[in-house]
Image (tube, helix red, strand yellow):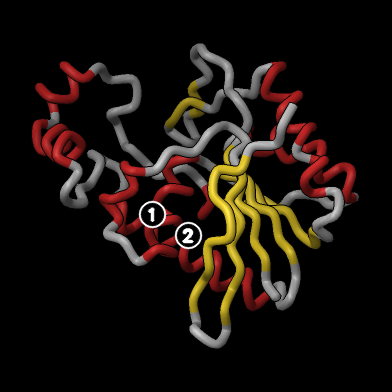
Amino acid sequence: MDIFYIVRHAEKQKGDFYNPYLRHQDEPITENGRRSAERLWSFFCKRNISAVYISEYLRTAQTAEFVAGQLGISPVIDRRLNEIDNGVIEGMSDEELQATYPEVWIGYRLRDHDFRFPEGETGAEAQKRIVELLEEKRLVHPSENVLFVCHEGLIRIMTCAIMGLPVYKRWNYKVDFCGIMEISYQPEYNNWKLIRFNNIVDQ
């Protein structure tokens, strides 16, 4: 049975950590986040993880570092795990967004249709890349357990795909720092089954 574990990164620091390559803030995790990331080992130590994939963001690498080290696995970067690209609106206040990109503001407020972030992605585009990644890694890792560390927005979009919901329904989900989602592939139905969502390892 394929079991994939998708984990949101740990708590990130506040401040200006702009990464021109990513075109977004690339915050490291906090000390509290580091402790939370290390506690993930109590969950994964008996899960027989065979591979670890992370996004291009620093906080996913730092979150995966301890667990991957304990497993003796080098995390593999896959840009398809990057957060949904919100283009040029990052850092804008609600007032600035409403004035500059009213159509985006309407889509965000109504949450009843998909829309494109200016110079960024639509929800459907982000969903397409994450669904493609899951299918690819399912074939690469047959009957193996795999860990992915990525971002809240992308996890919510992935959940919509698994649950067969429109991508704009992603706003109805919340994923905590280091929240764990677990899915398994059902070959008889050619789809993924949601086993757990936003599981938090106790302190």
168 to 34, vertically: above or below? below
Q: Where is residue 196 shown, x and y percent of the image?
A: 58, 54
Location of residue 87 by image quarter: top left
Type of the residue with mark 1:
Ala
Q: Is residue 78 visible?
A: no
Question: Which residue appears at 31% of the width and 42% of the height?
Answer: 171
Q: Is residue 136 above or below residue 54?
A: below
Which is more toward the observer, 8 or 23? Answer: 8
Residue beneath disc 2: 130
Q: Nearer the viewer, residue 70 or 125?
A: 70
Q: In the image, residue 154 lies at what x, y percent? A: 45, 47
Q: Residue at x 67, y 66 (%)?
A: 3
**Quadrant position of the N terminus in the picture:** bottom right
The answer to whether mark 2 and mark 1 are in CB contact below 8 A is yes
Furthest residue in direction top, as rendered: 15
The answer, for residue 85, to whether it is visible in the render is yes
Q: Which mark is on residue 126? A: 1
Disc 1, SS: helix
Alpha carbons under labels 2 and 1: distance apart: 6 Å
Q: Specify the quadrant that holds the C terminus.
A: top right
What residue appears at the point 64 percent right and 23 percent down from the top-left corner? 29
Res. 118 image quadrant: top left
Q: Describe residue 103's horizontal placement relative to residue 123 as left or right.
A: left
Amino acid type for the residue under numbered disc 2: Ile
* Residue 194 x %, y %: 53, 62
Q: State the image coordinates of residue 187 (x, y, percent, origin top left).
A: 57, 84
Secondary structure, mark 2, is helix
